[in-house]
Amino acid sequence: RHLMPWITSARRQFKTRTQSEDLLLNRNGAYRAAHWHDHLYPKSFIDHYKDVLRTVPCCQLLVMNIVEKNEAWDKLCPFLGMPIPKDHLFPFVNPRDANTRYRTVGTDA
């Protein structure tokens, strides 16, 4: 995922203050701040991305933008050594769907 769309999404998520101690600990552990911070959060995102690229062997790492429909089954299946499904759509979900807070994603068309 590119940085700017991630920042936009993360800011939207962090506008809601949470009292969940687990979520606050998770945010604090991952980003060194429990609430949005304009410097720490993007820096942590970039540092993590670089760490993954540096650590995971390229033959075991697939970097794809699942938001883009052109990077769906056509990119994932060959990487996994699997055939591309002909009768199943890639499970795209609109994350901005205001009517659904949680959703189970299936592969049925």
Image (tube, rainbow, N blue to C red):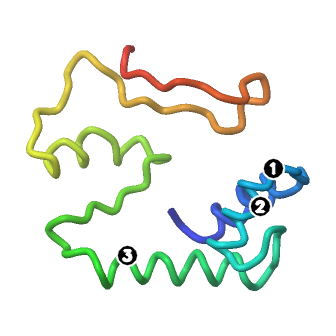
Q: Nearer the viewer, mark 2 or mark 3?
A: 2
Residue depicted at 43% across the width and 83% down the height: 50
Residue 59 in the figure: left or right of residue 107: left
Q: Against 6, is 81 above or below?
A: above
Determine the CA span between mark 3 and mark 1: 28 Å
User: For mark 2, what is the residue?
Assistant: 24
Q: Nearer the viewer, residue 18 or 43?
A: 18
**What is the three-letter code of the residue carrying label 2?**
Leu
User: For mark 1, what is the residue?
Assistant: 20
Q: Nearer the viewer, residue 8 or 15?
A: 15
**What is the three-letter code of the residue carrying label 3?**
Val
The secondary structure type at the circle numbered 2 is helix
Q: Nearer the viewer, residue 70 or 81?
A: 81
Residue depicted at 30% across the width and 20% down the height: 88
User: For mark 3, what is the residue?
Assistant: 52
Determine the CA span between mark 2 and mark 3: 24 Å
Q: Nearer the viewer, mark 3 or mark 1?
A: 1
The secondary structure type at the circle numbered 3 is helix
**Answer yes or no: do the residues labelled 3 and 1 have beta carbons within 8 Å?**
no
**What is the three-letter code of the residue carrying label 1?**
Ser
Locate residue 31, reporting x and y percent: 67, 75
Q: Earlier in the sequence, mark 3 or mark 1?
A: 1
Q: Residue furthest front?
A: 21
Determine the CA span between mark 1 and mark 2: 6 Å
**Pointer 2: residues within 10 angstroms few (<14), some, or many (20+)?**
some
**Answer yes or no: do the residues labelled 1 and 2 have beta carbons within 8 Å?**
yes
**Answer yes or no: do the residues labelled 2 and 3 have beta carbons within 8 Å?**
no
The secondary structure type at the circle numbered 1 is loop
Locate residue 74, reporting x and y percent: 23, 42
